[in-house]
Image (tube, coloured by chain):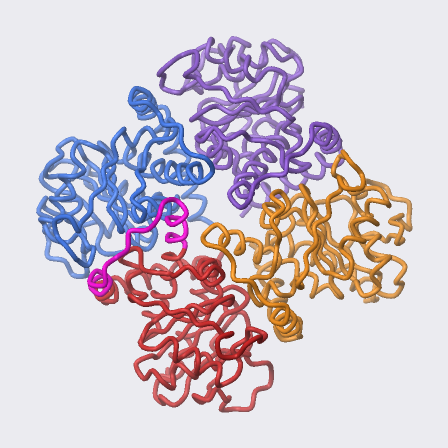
Chain colours: A blue, B red, C orange, D purple
């Protein structure tokens, strides 16, 4: 199997894992940089993540133009992916989602922050991007190159950006790391919300965030979680 | 297959999708205008939505009288449907439900409002109807023609109406749009409630609501979601 | 099939429905009065409700003594059932549970009250019983005849009683009504809690409660719900 | 089957029960003291609890050194187990987890306390351990012997200890008791959080906690729950 076939398989699998673990639902999407051409990225045709198969994966330039003229619909917000790959050579996988977990933060503007060692993999700073600031009253869809570029600018050197009244975008250096960070961002958000309503939050220090993130992004924790998520998905798909 | 057979199939499917996605439970119902006679509508016999098959679908006049004398029970609240079809020629599908998601708004009287681009498909104004205002102490059931007419009047030109201490009624120009709006009303309600308790809400502007609603009611998003919901239902029913 | 065999079947079925709908879990139990001898009642041997089969059902006197010497464990709290049957000849089915839904009320002492037409089937008054009032510091288990009698006294002519730091007990005139009331008590509790935290409660009036309860305890709504719950259970058990 | 084989089977089963009931997820682990050598304990290789089979179980000294040189990864936090077995000869089973239920308490610092008769099995005192107090800014992982010893010291003679910004550790005199206490700690936490947000908590008295705990740790309730959890797991694994 070629590197590109393997990449398509992994990207389709990541879509279905993130749907099965509640990060993606009918909407949202996940991409990866092309395994041999850093000037391209892979993303599915317009389809719900739970349903995506390797044959649904298409190639795009970093300007988010399809390499092969498409025969069906494309995702409207693919500039989110392309614009981040343009300015972040260290990023090789991106997930955009509107999970139930993060939305209360996106709607209220309450800052999301790491509250345990697994949430620490989000990093210390999770900026807010508000499309209104630069673009006024829009349809809230990040479809224009300048909108994607603005989002990528606010993401900056961080790993997670919250989008006001919209959702979140998560970046990773490789696919397993991205999936790990996306899932534990959602868990962190759920726990933080409940803790905050219950009685407040005892914040992690910047040093704790750095150390805990480094620990959890090692092969042992990521490998353990990856085996767990793939097995759960396989069992659910066989049922 | 005749247009009427297709309509019966689609209506039965919509019932089961809305049950599977948590909008309908043991109670609630969904109807559609007759495909060729705008003076009639289709609605199931009295049965829980999860169980409805095409053979359960009956025809009614807009006065909510059955065309064929029924052999079993009918829903008590079918005037909700008939009265809306009477005054809203643009409406061809109606859903009445008491979902867990919207009830906290119906019980507290806190206004439901769009908090993201998908919720924008509810429209900017979501009125409250209180049966008490015109009818005093009732059994809370909307069974009389004048009750249905009152509800339709408060719905007015909008797409969603909340019913105090009771539930919600949602309208659509066609079935897929109705299902989309019904499901994302519930998601919006859940997220709004959690955001409000966490720290408040940053409202969408009227222009954002209009633009985002127009974007999401295009064939691409509705088609993507429809494929997702029908596939999920088919998998669940085969399990 | 004899009336007693039918009663055993229905009671086993009710146990599994109430487990499947989230009212009962590993603990809790449901009983019914003997179909031909009003001086006896039927209750399972000590077993989790989800697992109960007709062969697990035993007979007891209203003093909660087993008619046949038992070969295994009995539920410790069966006086809850016997003591209610003693003083309420109109009651023919009883459920005792600690559902997640009602416990926040039992722990906080916040009154549970009907918030919609389905919750109205609980009745207007839902008293609190506190074992401490008469018995001081106990193991919180209602195992002694005088404890059961005290609980039945506080239940009085009502249909639901909340037990401080413990759970709830629900009564019905027949099994389908009991199941309906038990399930919609839990739904009411969940919705009331969320509404109260979101913004408060608009109470039903006593007349609305009376009228809505009468409507919902008619054969049509109860029959529709019973078909729904039994079908859902059958599907889940076949999966 | 030897005692050691039986122990491995039971430990693998306990891992999967605790995963299925929502105490453990991709992370967390459960151990038991060696059935014939109190100077050793049994714990799985580094793997998610839902996936653990008897063949994954390894033996460790109370210093948390593997008896046989491992061929793969070990859990990083096994000193949690070893250090508790060292100082608590009455403890023969330990669970460390980060369940959604307890985390709001670990994040907010709000004390967890028994709120019903089943939660009473946690005991009256549930101390907080804060790794920061003795060790400053760490990666939040309890990997060093002195960290494990510190945690065991704060646990003291109690049964549950909450770890700030991290999770919980639960101890039991035997495996079924540990599983019972772990599951009902989580249920207690969920109900306490909801009650506290709804309106506050009516605390159990120390005598009530002692009596209710003694009642629930008898063979009848533990046996009933154990049959329930093992049957539910078997059904889920067969689906």
Q: Which of B54 and D57 is in front in this view?
A: B54
Image quadrant where residue C85 sits: bottom right
User: Taking B171 as reference, is C80 above or below it?
Assistant: above
* C231 inside magenta stretch: no
Task: Quadrant for the N terminus of chain A, please.
Answer: top left
Task: Please state the horizontal and vertical placement of residue D78, each as a whole percent of the image.
Answer: 48, 17
Residue shown at the point (66%, 28%) measured from the top left? D177
User: Taking D55 as reference, is C140 above or below it?
Assistant: below
Say whether residue B55 is visible. no
Residue shown at the point (54%, 55%) measured from the top left? C192
Say whether residue B90 is visible. yes
Q: Nearer the viewer, residue C50 or C98?
A: C98
Left or right of D224 on screen, residue C188: left
Instruction: Count the marks.
Output: 0
Left or right of B58 on screen, residue C237: right
* B204 inside magenta stretch: yes
Q: Nearer the viewer, residue D115 or D66?
A: D115
Q: Nearer the viewer, residue D99 or A68?
A: D99
User: Taking C47 as reference, is C137 above or below it?
Assistant: above
Task: Please state the horizontal and vertical placement of residue B53, each as a whole percent of the image.
Answer: 49, 73
- Which region of the structure is painted magenta? B190-212
Task: Please state the horizontal and vertical placement of residue D146, each as a whole percent of the image.
Answer: 46, 8
Residue shown at the point (61%, 50%) measured from the top left? C102
Image quadrant where residue D20 sits: top right
Main SS, magenta region, reads: helix
Left or right of D83 on screen, residue A97: left
Left or right of D109 on screen, residue B126: left
């Amino acid at each position: 199997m070629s590197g590109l076939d393997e990449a398509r398989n992994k990207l389709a699998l990541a879509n279905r894992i993130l749907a099965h673990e509640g990060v993606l639902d009918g909407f949202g999407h996940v991409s990866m940089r092309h395994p041999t051409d850093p000037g391209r990225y892979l993303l599915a045709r317009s389809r719900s993540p739970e349903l995506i198969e390797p044959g649904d994966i298409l190639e795009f330039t970093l300007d988010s133009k399809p390499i092969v003229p498409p025969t069906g619909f494309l995702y409207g917000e693919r500039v989110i992916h392309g614009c981040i790959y343009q300015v972040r050579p260290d990023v090789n996988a991106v997930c955009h989602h509107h999970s139930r977990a993060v939305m209360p933060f996106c709607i209220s503007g309450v800052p999301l922050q790491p509250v345990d060692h697994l949430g620490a993999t989000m990093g210390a700073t999770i900026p807010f991007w508000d499309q209104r600031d630069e673009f006024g009253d829009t349809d809230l869809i990040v479809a224009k190159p300048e909108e994607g570029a603005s989002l990528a600018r606010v993401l900056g050197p961080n790993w997670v950006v919250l989008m006001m009244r919209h959702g979140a975008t998560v970046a990773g250096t490789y696919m397993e790391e991205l999936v790990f960070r996306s899932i534990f961002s959602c868990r962190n958000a759920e726990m933080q919300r409940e803790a905050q309503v219950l009685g407040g939050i005892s914040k992690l220090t910047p040093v704790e965030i750095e150390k805990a993130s480094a620990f959890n992004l090692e092969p042992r924790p990521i490998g353990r979680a990856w085996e767990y998520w793939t097995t759960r998905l396989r069992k659910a798909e066989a049922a």
